[in-house]
Image (cartoon, rainbow, N blue to C red):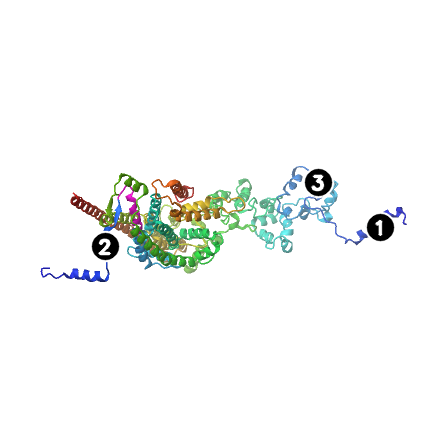
Amino acid sequence: MKPLVLVPLHLFLLAGLAAAAEPQRPAPGPGPLETSCVQCHRDLDGELLEPTKHTGDDIHFLKGLSCHDCHGGNPAAGMDGDPTAAHDTSRGWTGKPSRKVIPAFCAKCHADAVYMKRFDPHARVDQLSEYRTSVHGKKNAEGDERAAVCVDCHGVHGIRAISDPRSRVYPTNVADTCAACHAKPEIMGRYFIPTDQYAEYRRSVHARALYEKRDISAPTCNDCHGSHGAVPPGVDNVASVCGSCHGREATLFKETEAKRNLDLSACIQCMVCHSNHAVLPPTDAMLGVGPESTCTGCHDKGEPEYEAAAKMAAGLGRLTQLEAEAQQLLDRAAQAGMEVGPDRFALRKARDQIVETRVLGHGFDLDRFLAAANEGIAAAEAGVTAGQHAFAELRTRRIGLALSLLVIVVVIVLLAQKIRQIEARKTERMG
Amino acid sequence: MSDGLPSRAARLRAWLEERVPVAPLLAVAREKRVPLHRHTIWYYLGGMTLFLFGIQVATGILLLLYYRPSAGEAFESVQFIMTKVPFGWLIRSIHSWSANLLVLVAFTHMFSVFFLKAYRKPREITWVSGALLLGLMMAFGFSGYLLPWNTLAFFATQVGTEVAGKLPVIGHFALRLLRGGDQVTGGTLTRFYGFHVAVLPAIATVLVGLHLVLVQQHGMSVPPGVAAAGKSRGEPGRTMPFLPNFLLRDLIGWCAALGALAALAAIFPWELGEKADPFAPAPAGIRPEWYFCWMFQSLKVMPNLPMGIEGELVVILGIGAAGLLWLLVPFIDRQAETATGGGVGRIMVLAGWMALAYMAVMTLWVYVAPGGPG
């Protein structure tokens, strides 16, 4: 019989053996919100407290990163309130980076393809190299502390994913983000940059599409100027920038240059007629020699270009007027019950030619323009004729109906008389 | 005929009479008399239904000359009829308007027969054949609705055939039989065309023939109340000759109907709409023809019952049972001979009014509900 006093010893040995059998695991670090950084800064004030307010919506925190992943230091140390151990320079603690180094600071991760692909296989990693080509980047490299760096557009803490509608760089917010500096004379004044771009943009057809139609594919600042390589489009490449969306117009424009062996970049570019930031909805009145014409800004009466513009405007005007007339006639005929489906379908050709002709205006080729316009005019005239035929047919139907009803009424009257005759004869016989 | 020889025309008539003896039929027709009383007006509805049916046959045959029963060509062929074929618009519009008038007149005819108790002995089979004919007319309407292959027709057929799919036991079979597959496709169109121009007309020919023969044999029924009143006064009921008095009056009605059809077709030509696109979402306001609306609305508003019983199934079975009872009316109302009709008769009349009110309210509901056709 074993003495009872030995039992605790056995238990202790068994527990020791069991512990020895378990594999050794590395001690896990604190979670993103459990780091000494978060724990201490939560109790601080002012700008030292600020970063901890955004841990719930910052994309980095949501991806499992924490303060030390950017700022370095030891997140497990200093839980007792002593910042020295946490602010461990041997572990890369940098504190708040200066504005000059911020691009490189962010690029530690964002330019690292291997690291970034852990979070998003399609993540781009060229932002820093693009930034270095931009005016912002060049000024930053020169040591201009006021030049925009990453945090000016994306925010410091509380950075959201670009797909988040609340992000400062979400399409509907980009213009406001840029305007935060570019609409302020006190900032832009020293660089001699105008500050009316934002106000102009808000009047534009692009802004209308973006803000009124909520079409986030509509262009905002970065779609023309680039996101990180923000370079103002020079006069020589405006057509290329606009042409990245308006491809057909840009091709026609370039074809004209090639065909006529001209360099139009110095005198004509998209913005001469359409403006740059205040790209207003184009109208047919912009073409021609009328009061709203943009052609007369460069071409005077007597010049062949002036005459060509007048002919183009006349062709397009006739086409749109005939197409509208045909459309109206066919609509009215359809409302009156006439089947005009095939005619409406054929009229689409005129509509297509209006679009085609408007685009061809960018080629400055009068013959080609008028050929397209005439094709549409022929289709529109066919539509007008079809509409007129429909109304003529409607009148014929009404006349036919009136005559038929007349015949039917006469037959009814005759039948009624016949009945009366028969029944009168019978009464006579009976009488 | 001064020489005493018959004229050429008289000889031709005699020749024809010998081979196609029409005289005995004419003699019977001349003997036929139509009762005259305050309800005589309802007798004209049968002839009117027959006239409209004739219009349908005639215009239908004309439409057949151009119509092409395939998903790729049906819409275009109807569009061709409406725009290019001389008077094609008139023929198609009359066919469509006449179809609707036909169902309306047939419904009215049936309810008039019901309330005048004209179904009583020995006219039970006349009633049954008439009720079946009304169902047949609705089947004509349902199958014909799809034939232009436009969007409304396509989705209405989808909904309508789905109802058949809800039938217990035979539902899936019925659905596939109607659609020619699991979905409404070009195959369904060809099938409906087959029903519309061959199967249904064949059945209709038999039933119309039977119905007409029975009507001629039994003559017009005098409502029990009118007959009893005449008997109590000891007077024989007043009548008028069918040929020519009643027939001439019929002709006046038919001429008026023809005028109404011409006016409707000329002022409101039957619209064609947009070609069906099976991949497009169903447009808002899908509904069947007006005469199916009461069933459609019943299916729509009936909630599911406890114990997992589907509301739609209850409605389908309810309508089926009501239809069967309607068909058997002459065999249920055995006391119809009496002037008062007895207890069962009074219940029958009440049920008839309730059925009529139910159908009217449900149909109106479809037209006045928000988002409805009205």
Amino acid carrying label 1: it is: Leu
Q: Measuring from the top left, give residue B57's x and y in whole percent.
A: 31, 55
Is residue B38 part of the magenta span, yes or no?
Answer: yes
User: For residue B229, which quarter of the picture?
Assistant: top left
User: Which label lies toward us, 2 or 1?
Assistant: 2
Q: In percent of the image, x 24 and y 61: which residue is there?
A: B20
For the residue carrying disc 1, how many other residues have a C-alpha within 10 Å: few (<14), some (14-19), or many (20+)?
A: few
Q: Chain of mark 2?
A: B
Q: Are marks 3 and 1 in contact (CB under 8 Å)?
A: no
For the residue carrying disc 3, how many other residues have a C-alpha within 10 Å: few (<14), some (14-19), or many (20+)?
A: some
Q: Which of the two residues, B281 or A101, is positioned nearer the viewer here?
A: B281
Magenta extent: B36-50
Same chain for the residues under marks 3 and 1 in the image = yes
Amino acid carrying label 3: it is: Cys
Amino acid carrying label 2: it is: Leu
As drawn, the label of residue A13 is: 1
Q: Chain of mark 3?
A: A
Q: Which residue is mark 3?
A: A40
Residue A291 can be seen in this image: yes
